[in-house]
Image: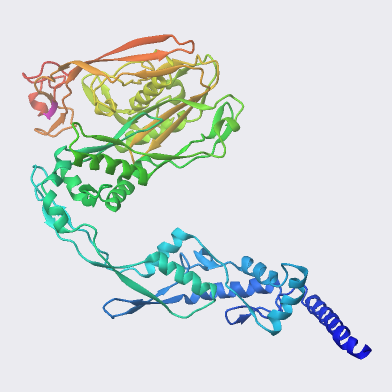
Amino acid sequence: MKRILFCLVGLPVLLALILFFTASLYTEWYAGRVFPGVRVNGYDLGGLTTAAVKNFIENINNRYAKEGMELVIAAPTGAGSRSLFKPVAGSDASEEVVRLDSDALSALAFSAGRVGSMWQRLFLPVFYGFIRPRTLTAPVAANDAAFRAVLVSALKGREDPAKNATVAFDHPEIDEAPRVIPEKIGLTFVYPAIERQIKEAMGRLSFAPITVPLAVFQPTVTARDIEPVLAALARPLSYGDLALNYIDPETKLLRTWVFSRAELAVLAEVRRDDNNTVILALQADAVKKYLAAAVKPLVDTPPREAKFVFENDKVKEFQASRVGLLVDLDKTYNDLDAAFRARNYAPAEAIKTVSVSVTIAEPKVKTADVNNLGITDILGVGVSTFKDSHTNRIKNIAHAVERLNGTLLKPGEVFSAIKVAGPFTADNGYLPEQVIKGREIKPEVGGGMCQIGTTLFRMAMNAGMDITERHNHSLVVGYYADPVNGNPGTDATLYEPTLDFKFVNDTGHYLLLQTEIDYKKQQLTFTLWGNPDGRSGSYSHPSVSRWIPAGDPEQVLVDDGTLKVGEQKCQAAFRGAVASFTYTRVTPNGEKVERVFDSYYRPLPKICMVGADPGTCPSGGCLPTATTSTSP
């Protein structure tokens, strides 16, 4: 009986103890290492440390990056082809966009047999090692957008997308029915399915070719769908142009891009609306391509961090923080498309203008964080264009811009343009350039400074400053035309020492002048920084009450040797004008102060200098001919 009892009870207990201690020794032996039998596909990871597993997987990643994965393209026609997909964005393996997650896999492999109940942690390692291995799938990490881009590039030219039936307008300028362009059946890749296949193959550490099918795609709009509504599809164009507007938040300048009827006809496509009705809409790809090429370069401003270096009563280095504004291509397109699609439903009045949508990016370091003068915000901005200026004029303007940049104004200080930018002499770096001298336009050192005065004038008004001196030009000059309506009136001339531009800093805080010259846009932008005190400033666009004809052309005979006998050199005519505009200031206490600036610009006829024979002139030189009213 004892022997029987021992066989029935003792042997199983003894066997269990032997198994327990064996399993304990087994798990202890592999402490810090992956248990045998834990594998990925045919690769056994048993006995490896987590670092070794990670290193092994990174080697596999490197192999994927170098060798790539072969994609076998199966077409419905039976004719196949092959393409190579490399899971990297460029030539550098560090740019991998889909890769094995070595950290995740090493943790997963090491945890196999080490989670669960005590009995699971004791006997599963033995089970994996001697009875049935544990097969893992390696986790895969991907940058989905970049993954799709690399995959599309690898399969480029291998598909023939389906095309919906659409329409073409042979004469978009008139209201006539378009002609139908038939649909086309296409062969297209189902990219999400291919991405899933690639990830699954990588998860098995497989390098075997992957078969990717080209699927037949049917168009969603056919010629039969369009023909009954063909005449109605001309309706959206009948409402005319569609404009896109953007107002710069700093300069307040308006930019406009106009899509004409002819351009809308080219950008249009046939689509179904939410009610399955066939309508005319705008092509997303074509419109976004236009926005990226024509709108973004003129609107996008990346965020900018603040810098402030003060030295010798002047700001030596200043970079104001700036909120970044980036064109939102998707929303801008959607707004344009919505405005255009609405025309299909015969509205009484169609939307003619859409605003550019932008996204905001905040700077990390703001202006208020880098100075102790209380300078925090933009008070006002002035803009002018020096388009088509001569070389010396541009150099003079750039030199003055450099001298003005970083100027600090103390509380109560009067700003003088001549004092800060001058003297306008050769010794001070200025070059000869054309200036108005009586009835002549002639070179003089420092020419072009009126561009500086005009930009300062507009800046000071937008900042709500108290302007104490301003003089308009004697002639209407195109450089100084109002940027909105093109009329004269918002200019300010500088001529040392008598004609200056001045304003007083009555804000009670320091002011900082920042100047910028944009050679590409041929534009000056002057910005006045300070501490907002509640004031504001604005001005109306100038109106011209009277244009004064230039008068009949004149000739002047000269015998000073500058012109050959009979040679002629002419000076352009200038018509005169009487212009005015209103400058409106709102003071910190809310008082509204209006000031009218009147400007008179005299007319000047075309004057031609003609070389004369000295022998025919009386002593003292030639006088004007009979057609000349006055001498230069």
Q: In this view, does 283 lie to the left or right of 84?
A: left
In the image, 556 versus 1, the foreground residue is 1
Q: Which residue lies furthest to the left in this view?
A: 626
Residue 31, position in %: x, y? 78, 73
The residue located at (94%, 88%) in the rendering is 2
Inspect the magenta stretch and tell me whether residue 609 lies in it: yes
Q: What segment is highlighted magenta in the picture?
A: 607-611
Identify the image quadrant of the N terminus: bottom right
Location of residue 549 by image quarter? top left
Residue 390, position in %: x, y? 29, 36
Residue 501, position in %: x, y? 39, 18
Count of numbered circles on the image: 0
Q: Give the dominant element type of the magenta stretch: helix, strand or loop.
A: strand
Q: In this view, does 85 lie to the left or right of 63?
A: left
Image position of 377 with respect to 8: above or below: above
In the image, 419 versus 324, the foreground residue is 324
Image position of 534 with respect to 329: above or below: above
Image position of 235 with respect to 163: above or below: above
Residue 581 visible to an observer of this rendering: yes
In the image, 476 versus 374, the foreground residue is 374
Q: Which residue lies furthest to the right in this view?
A: 2
Colour scheme in use = rainbow
Location of residue 214 by image quarter? bottom left
Q: In this view, does 196 lie to the left or right of 239?
A: right
Inspect the magenta stretch and tell me whether residue 93 lies in it: no
